[in-house]
Amino acid sequence: MHPKALLDACAVLVGQVLKLEHPADAVVSRHFREHRELGQRERATLAETVYAVLRYKLRFEHFAGSGSGPRERRLAILGFSGDGDFLRSALSPAEKTWLDACQQVPEAELSERHRHNLPDWVVPPLKAQLGEEGFWALAGSLLQGAPLDLRVNALTDKREDVRKELSLAGIPSELTPYSPWGLRVQDKPALTRLDAFARGAIEVQDEGSQLLALITDARRGQMVVDFCAGAGGKTLALGAAMRSTGRLYALDVSAHRLDQLKPRLARSKLSNVHPVAIAHERDDRVKRLAGKVDRVLVDAPCSGLGTLRRNPDLKWRQKPADVAELQVRQQAILASAARLLKPGGRLIYATCSILPDENEQVAEAFSAAHPGLKPLPVQGLLEQARVAQAASLCSAGGLHLRLWPHLHGTDGFFAAAWEKPGG
């Protein structure tokens, strides 16, 4: 594609995504379906330009104010992913001069908000948790893309065997440092073309999400509930840990998301998974399981702010009022999920958020409202699962899982655990 045409296409897509009406990945995917003439390199340039604009939105909008022409074009120029000479061949003399001036501004001269590129309302709670130095380390990591983590299906394959198989296919990988099931690859290889994918030996799943399955510790022959299963990534990990025995319910209020589990389930070779669409957390199908379940995992609906490396649009689409509403919903779901436990059963609450409002505050309120449940230190659960450096993955005292992109190389995750006495 001619440089000017490609830059124009980037500007159009940037404008569509910045409406922030739908998730960025959905907008990009729809655009590609509507423009099938785009080649692989052109699609990569478009997507990476859009994500750069989302990551650096505050900074780019600051610079864009000094330029001329349509806003979307100025932002696309600043975020353009590709060869610099290619880009410059699409620019007018005035645009080249403006771009040079923007690129020559030292980062140290920028304001804080133009350096961290985070909404003002999330900065105080992050600084309170991490301190000034930790906050800036986190902010820097959130401006980077994330590697691709894979979970090897322990029911059917061994991690080292799959790693060798990927290497032969030209896809080098590293062992994830904490999860015994994980492989980490760079870039975005075409996994769906691999036999390892087709036969269910691998699934895309962040290492932090894999650790949630380890904390849950689902075992052979148990009755287990994945309360907010979504597309089933953690369901599949739990099912493999159970060696396809017992009974594993995948519950979700979205039948559409559960439909996405079906082809993954077929590949996984699991026969113990039962997807169930529910109307709400008090659905009769949930009540029928009361007092019968050994393990309940609640990976609750949340702001998703721990996934900003992958989903940078979330920081612009979420608002404080949204988090307040989510907190109420999280409490309600957790309370309903707790009723399912049988004596000796374990409850796990998890989010991919980095905000204490959705994490410690929810866990502390739940513990206060349910004194009959015993909080379990997550550090001990990780050590029982033989996870390396378990203490470094937890909050002070080891009570909660607390994963950070800049410290652990995972998405941001939180988890708390309780046990129902008896059994």
Image: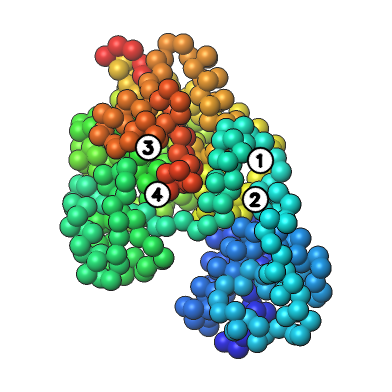
Look at mark 2 in the image and give the residue it sits on. 116
User: Is there CB contact under 8 Å for labels 1 and 2?
Assistant: yes
At x 80%, y 72%, the residue is 67
Residue occupied by mark 3: 212
Residue 376 lies, in percent from the top left, at: 37, 21
Q: Quadrant of the N terminus?
A: bottom right
Q: Position of residue 148 (x, y in %)?
A: 40, 57
In the image, what residue type sits under mark 2?
His
Q: Earlier in the sequence, mark 4 or mark 3?
A: 4
In the displayed structure, does residue 93 sit left or right of residue 292?
A: right
Indicate which disc, 2 or 4, sits on the residue closer to the N terminus. Answer: 2
Sequence-wise, the earlier of marks 1 and 2 is: 2
**Residue, x 22% and y 58% (percent of image)?**
162
Mark 1 and mark 4: span between their CA atoms?
Answer: 25 Å
- Relative vertical location of residue 416 with respect to residue 181 in this rendering, above or below: above
In-front residue for pair 174/339: 174
Residue sitting at x 24%, y 66% = 167
The kind of residue on which mark 3 rests is Leu
Q: Dot 4: few (<14), some (14–19), or many (≥20) neighbours within 10 Å?
A: many
Residue 213 visible (yes or no): yes
Q: Residues within 10 Å of mark 2 (few under 14, many from 20)?
A: many
Q: Secondary structure at mark 1?
A: helix
Tell me which amino acid carries mark 4: Asp
